[in-house]
Image (cartoon, rainbow, N blue to C red):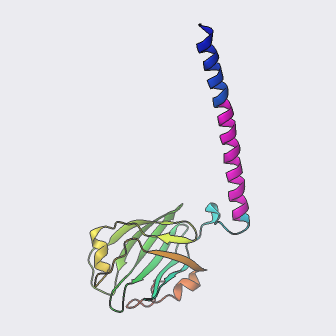
Amino acid sequence: MRRIPIVISFLILIACGVSNEHNSQETQSSADLDQAAINAGILTDPNDIRLEGRFETRNSIGTDKFCAIKTSAKDYNIGILAIFGSDSFCEGRGVASLDGENLSVILNESSKNISENCEFTASFDGVSLQLPGELPEPCAKFCNNRASLIGTHYFHIENGNESAKKSNGRGLKPLCKY
């Protein structure tokens, strides 16, 4: 009877070893697929994420815009415009710093007289920029008429500082300061 617990323990150890080997193979297969997608241009290389350029999201109301001009290795001058109607929009300029997929944003300039900065962290995967679902109270001051920056997203449509310089806001022209 003492052998049964030993045999069961031995079988469990063998099963764990097989499971770990299988997981290791799946992890390697996933890494190979990711690399193939990067090589084919389907996925962005996480070691080569570039923020500088022009971003847009078009809808029936208008075109939401985001632009980024590189000022140093990880720092950018940025501008943002989110449209919710003819008189309902959010707009601001500021600075940002990219660390991996995290973009730390400080909006500090608007076409209105604003005394507080809007600070938040957005996520950027190399193609899409997504603002968080919750923002600090000062961010509302960059908006008017029931508009909000909460959860807005933008898609990278053109690379480079020169393309970012072409973006114009409603009151901020150009949208990105350079």
The part of the image, by quadrant, that contains residue 104 is: bottom left
The residue located at (43%, 80%) in the rendering is: 80
Residue sticking out furthest to the top: 1
Residue 139: x and y in percent read: 31, 73
The residue located at (34%, 77%) in the rendering is: 148
The residue located at (58%, 80%) in the rendering is: 157
Q: Quadrant of the image for the N terminus?
A: top right
The part of the image, by quadrant, that contains residue 18 is: top right
| Residue 31 among magenta residues | yes
In the displayed structure, does residue 34 sit left or right of residue 76? right
Task: Name the foreground residue: 149 vs 175.
Answer: 149
Residue 75: x and y in percent read: 50, 69
Task: Name the foreground residue: 114 vs 152.
Answer: 152
Residue 145: x and y in percent read: 28, 85
| Residue 126 among magenta residues | no
Against 58, is 154 above or below? above
Residue sticking out furthest to the front: 1
Residue 162: x and y in percent read: 58, 85
Against 43, is 82 above or below? below
In the displayed structure, does residue 114 sit left or right of residue 46? left
Q: The magenta stretch spans which residues? A: 17-38
What main secondary structure does the magenta stretch of the protein show? helix
The part of the image, by quadrant, that contains residue 6 is: top right
